[in-house]
Amino acid sequence: MGYYCLVAAQHANANEIRDTAGTFNALQAMGPGVLGVVALGLLAYGAYMLVQARFPILRGLGAR
C-alpha cells in the first residue's frame, strides 16, 4: 500500500492509491510465489508480536 501511495504522489494523482484489497489483487497478479512470500512475512510478524506480548521483558533487548 505504501508503494502505491508513493506512485500516486509522484504522479500527483490520488486515484492511483489502492486499498488493501487492491494491493492484494496486484500481488496475486504477480504470481502465487509473491503472494506466498507476503503471507509468510505476515505470519512471521504475527508470531513476533505474540512473543513481544507474552514476554514484555524482551522488548528492550534490540534497542541498543
Image (spheres, rainbow, N blue to C red):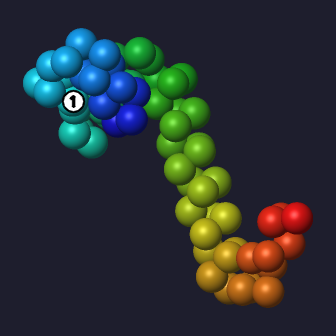
Q: Quadrant of the C terminus?
A: bottom right
Q: Residue furthest left?
A: 15
Residue 42 visible from this viewpoint: yes
Is the residue 39 above or below the residue 36 in the image? Answer: below
Q: Position of residue 53 (x, y in %)?
A: 63, 82
The residue at the point 53 percent across, 50 percent down is 42
Q: Is residue 42 left or right of residue 22?
A: right
Q: Quadrant of the N terminus?
A: top left
Q: Given the image, on which type of amino acid does mark 1 rest?
A: Ile
The residue at the point 64 percent across, 65 percent down is 47
Q: Position of residue 24 (x, y in %)?
A: 32, 33
Number of numbered markers: 1
Q: Is residue 58 left or right of residue 28?
A: right
Q: In terms of image quadrants, where is residue 9? A: top left
Could you tell me which secondary element the residue under label 1 belongs to? Answer: loop
Q: In terms of image quadrants, where is residue 19? A: top left
The residue at the point 36 percent across, 26 percent down is 6
Q: Position of residue 49 (x, y in %)?
A: 61, 69
Is the residue 52 above or below the residue 34 in the image? Answer: below
Query: How would you rate the neighbour count of disc 1 (Cα within 10 Å): few for under 14, some for 14-19, many for 20 or more?
Result: some
Q: Which residue is mark 1?
A: 17
Q: In terms of image quadrants, where is residue 11? A: top left
Is 47 or 64 nearer to us in this picture? Answer: 64
Residue 26 visible from this viewpoint: no
Is the residue 56 above or below the residue 12 in the image? Answer: below
Q: Is residue 51 left or right of residue 26?
A: right
